[in-house]
């Protein structure tokens, strides 16, 4: 015949396991819900960053108006002219790239003549021709304050 103390001990252990199981189930459900909410927030943040990047590129191309154009309406580009313009404005390739929405390596390639900028970048370069050093610095500071998103130029 079992001892009353051992039966009582087993019953207490069984009830404790039952209570523990119910508490952990609630915690597991809450944890799963939080994980799904976090994943949804991450997706939303990524979508917003992508939208911000697209809008930033659109603003850069829309603010760039052709300053010097040939009779056909196209803007002329020369590697020497870009190099001279960058020196005149006192900009590094990285700063000019930030203004134009491209990388510093693209600027070096354009100046070397190994590649040519696309039409939106050519228009943006032409728009910079009419600006002075102060205006360019102000635009750089404005772009720096906006805080480009990861992966954005």
Image (cartoon, grey):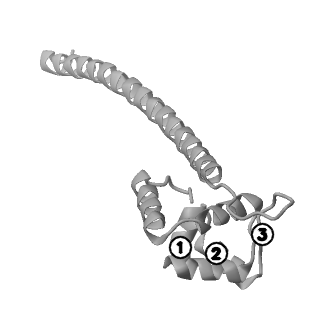
Mark 1 or 2, nearer chain start: 1
- State left or right for residue 19 relative to residue 142: left
Mark identifier at residue 76: 3
Q: Position of residue 125 (x, y in %)?
A: 65, 66
Which residue appears at 48% of the width and 30% of the height?
36
Q: Nearer the viewer, residue 123 or 7?
A: 123
Q: Nearer the viewer, residue 26 or 141?
A: 141
Label 2 packing within 10 angstroms: few (<14), some (14-19), many (20+):
many
Q: Position of residue 31 (x, y in %)?
A: 39, 30
List the residue tagged with mark 2. Answer: 107
Q: Position of residue 128 (x, y in %)?
A: 59, 65
Q: Is residue 61 above or below residue 109?
A: above
Residue that protrudes farthest toward the right in the picture: 72
List the residue tagged with mark 1. Answer: 94
Label 1 sits on a secondary structure element that is helix
Mark identifier at residue 14: none
Which residue appears at 84% of the width and 61% of the height?
71
């Amino acid at each position: 015949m079992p001892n009353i103390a051992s039966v009582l001990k087993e019953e207490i252990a069984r009830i404790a396991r039952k209570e523990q199981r119910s508490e952990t189930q609630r915690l597991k459900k809450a944890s799963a819900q939080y994980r799904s909410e976090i994943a949804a927030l991450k997706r939303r943040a990524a979508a917003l960053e992508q939208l911000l990047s697209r809008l930033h590129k659109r603003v850069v191309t829309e603010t760039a108006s052709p300053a010097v154009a040939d009779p056909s309406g196209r803007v002329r580009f020369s590697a020497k002219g870009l190099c001279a313009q960058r020196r005149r404005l006192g900009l590094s390739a990285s700063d000019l790239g930030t203004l134009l929405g491209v990388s510093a390596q693209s600027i070096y390639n354009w100046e070397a003549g190994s590649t040519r900028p696309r039409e939106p970048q050519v228009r943006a370069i032409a728009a910079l021709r009419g600006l002075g050093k102060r205006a360019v610095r102000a635009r750089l500071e404005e772009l720096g304050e906006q805080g480009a998103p990861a992966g954005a130029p």
